[in-house]
Image (cartoon, grey):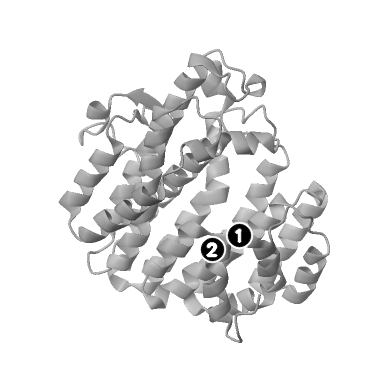
Amino acid sequence: MDFGNSDERYQEEILPHVSRTFALTIPQLPPGLRTAVTNAYLLCRIADTIEDEPAVSPEETYQFLERFAAVVSGAKDPAALACALDGRFSDRTLPAERDLVRNLERIVRVTWGLGAQRAAIERCIALMCRGMHEFQRSASIRGLPRSSDLDGYCYYVAGVVGEMLTELFCAYSPAVAARHDALAELSVSFAQGLQMTNILKDFWEDRSRGACWLPQETFARHGVVLAELSPGRTGAGFGAGLSELIGVAHAHLRNALAYTLLIPRTEPGIRRFCLWALGLAVLTLRRIAANPAYTSGAEVKVSRPVVWLTRISTSLVVGDDRMLKRLFELAARGLPLAVPGIGDGFRQVSAAGAAREDSAPSWRQPVL
């Protein structure tokens, strides 16, 4: 692909070829923030591409990821790494992803020119490359042992991104920076809600590739052995375990709304960026909850008309907190909801009880 001489132009043009969702949400950001967030997303996508390549051994993958983190920090040569990776990719790597890696030098030139925003991106990539690989190398269809392992996995593949985005938002806007501490407290939870939704949606596709990110302990309570499942033959126990995880994801997404409402109304672009992702996640959870016997992500994916309606409805009331809360409640209606118990993570409760403002305080608790 040839997108001209500008590195920033290359970023803008390659983005829709590697992500339909972010190609919709990132352009909503103000220009002074858009370049940095596009750059950060593309770097994360390169890390995913390296990790997902089946033709490379786990040991080599780790070495490539370490080199990639060093490239982003300016300690290694991007052209040499791009050449080494290009020679190892199999047909499983999509042409657009291959093109992105070939243009690694252009991407990191943008990173290196970001000034104060650069540090947050470097930190995110370093943590993601180390933590993500530790989970991927032990992945199996047996699932993760504990719910805390799911939290850890979500942190390394998404939570660090939530932290990074918060720093980028604050570096861009003094008004956002004035709320830094409150945003930082919710940033990991916001990201985990989105990631858990994707994990649930893509459960069967991940399993076909030999990975399962669901916690064994959750399903064992309902007599389910994750390794023994097959599409179309799951049973009531699987649905019960799924309901628990939907409740946890729902709780995180309530924190995501609280995070979004902390963004000043004077920054509607940042609000839209958050709201569109949040709205689509809630509606995806609704589809999963309504069809626990789904056998592919396509069965529970939100339709294009619903995507369009979500964009329009949230944009119309982007500065109206009361209406945004109402839209969220409408979208989340009927979903199970979990809130933290004392010292024992999330516990399942009714939606009405969990939404009360006077329930036990916790950074992970829904705050609406």
Q: Residue furthest top?
A: 223
Residue 63 shown left or right of residue 218 in the figure: right
Q: Position of residue 359 (x, y in %)?
A: 24, 31
| Badge 1 amino acid | Arg
Q: Residue at x 64, y 48 (%)?
A: 132
Q: Position of residue 10 (x, y in %)?
A: 58, 77
Which quadrant of the view contains residue 263? bottom left
Residue 343: image tag = none
The one nearer the camera, 73 or 314, is 314
Q: Residue at x 63, y 29 (%)?
A: 143
Residue tagged 1? 45
* Vertical position of residue 331 compared to residue 272: above or below: above
Residue tagged 2? 41
Q: Is residue 144 visible?
A: yes
Residue 228 shown left or right of residue 116 in the figure: right
Q: Residue at x 41, y 52 (%)?
A: 187
| Badge 2 amino acid | Tyr
* Vertical position of residue 61 compared to residue 202: above or below: below
Q: Position of residue 205 (x, y in %)?
A: 61, 38
Answer yes or no: do the residues labelled 1 and 2 have beta carbons within 8 Å? yes
Q: Is residue 221 visible?
A: no
* Vertical position of residue 245 compared to residue 115: above or below: above
Total numbered labels: 2
Sort mark 2 into few (<14), some (14-19) or many (20+) by Cα contacts within 10 Å. Answer: some
